[in-house]
Amino acid sequence: MGDRIQVNLTTDDIPKQWYNIIPDLPEPLPPPKDPEEGESRIKNLPNLMIGECLNQEFSKENWIDIPEELVQLYAHAGRPRPLFRATNLEKKLDTPAKLYYKSEFFSPTGSHKVNTAIAQCYYAKKQGFKRVTTETGAGQWGTALSYGASLAGLECTIYWVRAVYEWKQDRRTFMELLGAEVNASPSPKTDFGRKLLEKDKKHPGSLGIAISEGLEDSSKSPDAVYCLGSVLNHVLMHQTIIGLETKHQFEIFDDYPDIMISCLGGGSNFGGFVLPFVGDVLTKGKKIKFIAAQSKVAPNLQGEYKYDFADYAEITPLLKMYTLGHKIDMAPIRGDGLRYHGCSPIISLLRNLGYIDTIAYERDEKYVFEKSKLFINTEGWLPAPESAYSICCAIEEALKCKESGEKKTIAFNVSGHGFMDIPGYREVLEMK
Ligand SMILES: *Cc1c(COP(=O)(O)O)cnc(C)c1O
C-alpha cells in the first residue's frame, strides 16, 4: 500500500470532554465589560442566554464533560469526521510538504456550525425551553440551528438578513424542511422590525438588525431562548471536538503539524480546530505556526485590540477583541461567513501575545477561488466559499516549502461544503 490517505475514528472515539483553554492561557482572559452609560448588559445575560452555556462561558475547568446523550447526537450528525492526507494536491503542487485536511464538509447542513448548534439546543431543551431563535447572515448558522432544534425537538425561529434571504432560496427551503420558521429581516414579527419596515418596505436588513429581532423575540417569549453561532468562549469550546479528533488522528498517522490553518470570521472553526494544539504549545513546549485566513473586506485580526460591542445594536456587553468597529460597513463577498467586525476574545488574546498569524485576501476572491478549484480538481471535494480561504493559505504555505525544500506538515480545516454555493463559484470564476 502507498501512503495512508485518511484516518477515521469510530463512534467510540468521539471525545467525551471539550477542551477549555482558558485556564491554560498565559494571561487571564479580559472579562466582558459594561459600557459606561446605559443598563448593565452583563446583568441581563442570564435573561438572554442558555444557563449551561453561560456557566461554560466563564468556566475555569480545563475539561468539560460532554453529556452522554450529546455524544450520541454527535454520532447522529456523522461524527467523527475523517482527517485526509491531500496526496493528489501535494503531487500537483510538487511540494515536499505533507498536507492534511479535516473534513467538516461532511456536516449534514454543510458546516462545522452544527457542532455547537446541537449542544446549544440540547441544553436549551434540558432547561425547559420550547423554542430557539437566532439571526443568520450567510445562512449557515440558521441551517445548523434548524438542524439542532429538529434533533432536540424544539421549534426554531430564524431572522435572516433580507438581502440574502431573497437570493438563497434553496437554503431557505432547506431550513424549512428541517422545520424552522424563516423570516426575512427586518420582519413584521418584532417592534424593531416593524419600525424599520414602516420607513422602507423593502429594507435590505443587516446582521445587526437580525440579531436585534432574534433577541427581541426571545426576550418577549418566556419559553424561547436566543442562540449565538460564533465568537463566544463556549462556542469555541464546543468546536474543540474538531481539534481533539484531529489530534487523535495525527497520532494514528504518526505525524504532527508544523503549521495549522483555517479561515476566520468570528473564530469558531479556527478556534475549534487549533485550540487543542495551542494547548500543546502553551503547556508542552510544542512549536506550531497558526495562521488565520481572512478577507480584506473584514480583516478583523488586523483591527484594533480594544473593548467593543459584539453586535450592531449594542445589546451585548463589551468584549475585548480585535475589531474593525461594530458599526463598520463591509462589502459583500461570497465567503459571507467571514464578514464579521470582531474576532473571538480567546483568539484575540492569543493573537495579541504573538501566537497567531493572519493573512487577508483580496475582495474579488478570484485568487482564492482559483486555489479552491485546484483543490476540487485534485482532491474532489467541493469546499464552502469560506473554506476556500483556508485552502488558499495552505497551498501558499505548501508552495513556500517547495521553494525552501522543507518537508513541513501542514494541517488545514475545510469548515464546510459548497453544494449550495455553486452560483458563487460560477460568478467569481467567470464560468458560463
Ligand atoms: C460561519 C462559517 C465560517 C466562519 O465562522 P467562524 O466562526 O469564524 O468559523 C467559516 N466557514 C463556514 C463554512 C461557515 O459556515
Image: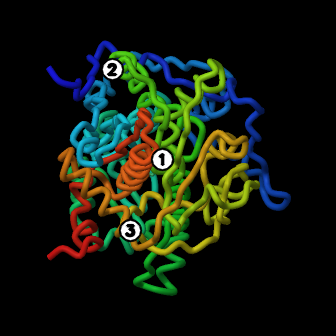
Left or right relative to 103: residue 231? right
From mark 3 to mark 2, how far is it between C-alphas? Answer: 33 Å
Taking depth in this image into account, of 96 and 145 the one nearest to the observer is 96
From mark 1 to mark 3, how far is it between C-alphas? Answer: 24 Å
Q: Which of marks 1 and 3 is nearer the N terminus?
A: 1
Q: Is residue 295 above or below residue 113?
A: below
Choose mark 1 or mark 3, whichever is in front: 3
**Crowd band around label 1 with a 10 angstrom C-alpha radius: few (<14), some (14–19), many (20+):** many
Q: Quadrant of residue 424?
A: bottom left
Taking depth in this image into account, of 418 and 99 the one nearest to the observer is 99
Q: Is residue 134 above or below residue 247?
A: below
Residue carrying label 2: 253
Residue 14 location (% of width, % of height): 35, 19
Q: Quadrant of the N terminus?
A: top left
Which kind of residue does numbered mark 1 sit on? Answer: Gly
Residue carrying label 1: 229
Residue at the image position 29 percent from the left and 45 percent from the top:
94
Residue 326 location (% of width, % of height): 65, 65
Q: Earlier in the sequence, mark 3 or mark 2?
A: 2
Taking depth in this image into account, of 230 and 131 the one nearest to the observer is 230
Q: In this view, does 273 lie above or below 192?
A: above
Left or right relative to 392: residue 34? right
Visible in this render: residue 193? yes
Visible in this render: residue 125? no
Residue carrying label 3: 365
